Amino acid sequence: MQAASIKMNNIFTDTLNGKKCSRPPVWLMRQAGRILPRYMKMREKYSFEQLFTTPELAAEVTLLPVEDLGVDAAILFSDILTVPKAMGLDMDWTQKGPVFNSPLVFESDPIKKLDVKTESLSYVYQAARKVKQMSDIPLIGFCGGPLTVLCYMLEGVSSNQTFPLSKTFFYQQTSKAKQLIDLLTEVTIEYAEKQSECGIDAFQLFESNAGIVPLEMYEKLFLPAVTRICKAVRAKGIPFIFFGKGISGGVNIVKPETCDFYSADWQMPLSVVRKNLDKEIGLQGNFDPWLLFAPKDVIEKAVINMKPFFKENPKWIANLGHGVLANTPLENVKFLISRIKETIWE
Ligand code: CP3
């Protein structure tokens, strides 16, 4: 296997541990997917679900971006919707993306419709262990955030990602929402703990929908669940990264007990996020995914612009402010990564 020959570097874990490095480490959300020609080849033969539920294939896909893009960390090839499936939701990953056949919002007693079988998630742990056997590259485990996953459970896929039925539910049926959040949090904690026992080097929580509710609602209803998940992961000795898309402006709600690193979305400059974020917390992000459609000199300039930030903030992991978009030119993705790795930062 080619991956075994890739030289281990500790820049990702060193940065997570607060050690100053000569450059920021880099990986990209959604780095393993449709932008990689070798992934597309595999997709001709296997469905997305087959790829992530078969540990050997999931491990192979996890390592593709390390080999083909030169990133400093791998993220387990899986999906945040593994958890709703294990909780008994009737859903499938189709050619067009995930489809929920009976979203909970239409049920009079949603919790009754659930049938939690966490043992069905063992393929995820097998895949993580396999990656660690195959490569020394730091591995990131992950789960979805409580709000994001609950929105999918309640409503399925929302056409413009605003989840109007879920928002209505949070206001009209707050106590039922709380029950669902509690159950989802219990399952997520077990999921995060079990991944943490597989040798992963970091754990990231993807709260991609954080910005669809008012900040006060996020802080009251959902953030305590994130803090509980963080506590469980930390107890296993694993650093915790929190991606809260849409809350950059209100990032002062994120406290040291919420996460070790905060992954910022692309909306605000990192220097502004930094001013509002607790000093103990490191930062990850936040190049705009659309930047990768720009000419190379624009990409290069965006990297160079980060030099003063890195000088003052060595606790920075370079990444995008959201996942790599489909159809992103592969050569621009490679260019961004090589510029981050080859720029003289000091
Ligand atoms: O970052 C990575 O490369 C790791 C793997 C990963 C996937 N999904 C693989 C995937 C991660 C971390 C996710 C997270 C995820 N999944 C989120 C939160 C992050 C975000 O981008 O906002 C959400 C909302 C999902 C749910 C999901 N999965 C949707 C809505 C879709 C369809 C739309 C799309 O992006 O394709 C998926 C499918 C999915 N998840 C693919 C991949 C590689 C595409 C599979 C394919 O068709 O080959």
Image (cartoon, rainbow, N blue to C red):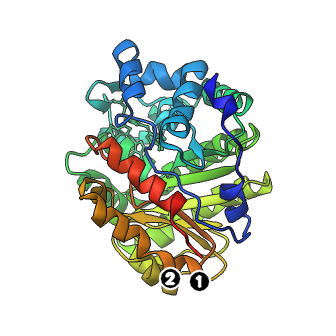
| Left or right: 105 as drawn, with respect to 237 | left
In x, y percent, where is residue 252?
A: 51, 81
Q: Are marks 2 and 1 in contact (CB under 8 Å)?
A: yes
**Relative image position of residue 135 (x, y in whole percent):** 69, 33
Q: Mark 1 packing: few (<14 Cα in 10 Å), some, or many (20+)?
A: few
Query: Residue lying furthest bottom in this view?
Result: 275
Q: Nearer the viewer, residue 97 or 220?
A: 97
- Number of labelled discs? 2
Nearer to the camera, 192 or 138? 138
* Residue placed most toward the observer, 65 or 179: 65
Name which residue lies at 39% across and 52% down. Answer: 335
Helix, strand or loop at disc 2? Answer: helix
Q: Which mark is residue 308?
A: 2
Are there few (<14), some (14-19), or many (20+) residues within 10 Å of tag 2? few
Where in the figure is residue 25, as x and y percent of width and height? 59, 59
Q: Please state the quadrant of the image where ligand 1 appears.
A: top left
42 relative position to 291: left or right: right
Left or right of 110: which side holds 67?
A: right
> Which of the 4 image quadrants contains residue 103?
top left
Any part of residue 125 in sight: no
Q: In whole angstroms, how far apart are the C-alphas of marks 2 and 1? A: 7 Å
Residue 160 seen in this snapshot = yes
Farthest residue to the left: give it.
Answer: 159
Task: Identify the disc placed on residue 55.
Answer: none
**Closest to the observer: 302 or 264?**
302
Q: Is residue 219 above or below residue 190?
A: below
Q: Amino acid at mark 2?
A: Pro
Task: Identify the residue shown where x is 42% and y is 68%.
Answer: 303
**Mark 1: C-beta under 8 Å from nearest atom of ligand 1:** no
Disc 1 element:
helix
Whether 104 is drawn above or below 44: the answer is below
